Amino acid sequence: MAMPGQLMFARRLGPTARLLIWLAIGIACVLADVRYHALDGLRGGFSLVLQPVRETLRAPFHVADELGGFFTRHRSLQKERDALLAERTQLYVAQRASRDLARENSELRALMKLPVRPGGRIVGAAQLYQGHDWFAQRIILDRGSSSGLRAGLPAVDAEGLVGQLSRVYPGSSELTLVSNPDQPTPVFVERTGQRGLAAGAGHGRMELRYMPAHADIQSGDRLLTSGIDRVYPPGIPVARVIRVTRSQSGPYLRIECAPLAGIDRARAVLVITTDFEAGKP
């Protein structure tokens, strides 16, 4: 039964009618929003409510972008680091080469100022390698008999006497250093003029032998070649006295010297040739 006031034969709206009503409402809302901006507040509220949802949905894309950028920057930094390391290595090598060239240039300049006795000439030679037995104090040079060298000729560097050629081959030669114990060198003391015989004492050192106990020898005295053997030109620096020990029982002084030439570092030497055979007037 119908309730009081209720129509007994009321009909519900059909789907078409409901659609038209909603279309009318939608058009009205659109017109009100376009003309009067009536839905701005509602739109702002929805935007505020949906903001966390949007951030949550966009988070994976942000993470993916950050990871991609991180790996890209990491590879770029690695390549830049490798390039800088390679450049630093090249600069270090170039610096070493420049330093070596400057040192060699200064040595050659000093060598070219070395005076040569009349009738003689000089032949430049470079060190190839040390001898098989370094304790024998010998080095191998890159010049030999094809350059006019022969056994017995002296070799000097910018600081003084390096040694004497002991063996000569066509393209190389063996230089026995002044620090060799079996290599005596006639010398005189620059300060007093007293003559003596210097020889190697091993470990890159020398000694002045057979000097009487009353001889005037002091630390710091410089020893020069005397030239009496007609092998070494006179006046070439040989060594400097570093220690003088007076023996209480023996008749001779014990005199330790240090070679002036760079026997352990010289790269270039000058071999002095003369117009007479070594040891002959």
Image: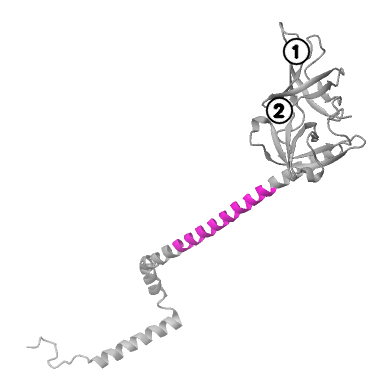
Residue that sits furthest to the right in the current view: 118
Main SS, magenta region, reads: helix
Residue hosting label 2: 180
The count of marks equals 2
Work out which quarter of the rendered image holds the N terminus and state it.
bottom left
Label 2: how many Cα within 10 Å (few below 14, some 14–19, many 20+): many
Would you place residue 104 above or below residue 62 in this image? above
Please provide the residue range marked out in magenta: 66-94
Cα separation, mark 2 vs mark 1, equals 20 Å
Give the image location of residue 120, x and y in percent.
89, 37
For the point 46% across and 63% down, which residue is it?
A: 68
Q: Amino acid at mark 2?
A: Asn
Q: Amino acid at mark 1?
A: Leu
Give the image location of residue 278, x and y in percent.
83, 32
In the rendered view, does 8 fall on the left or right side of 241? Answer: left
In the rendered view, does 70 fall on the left or right side of 23? Answer: right
Q: Which mark is residue 253?
A: 1
SS of the residue under disc 2: loop
Would you place residue 151 above or below residue 28 in this image? above
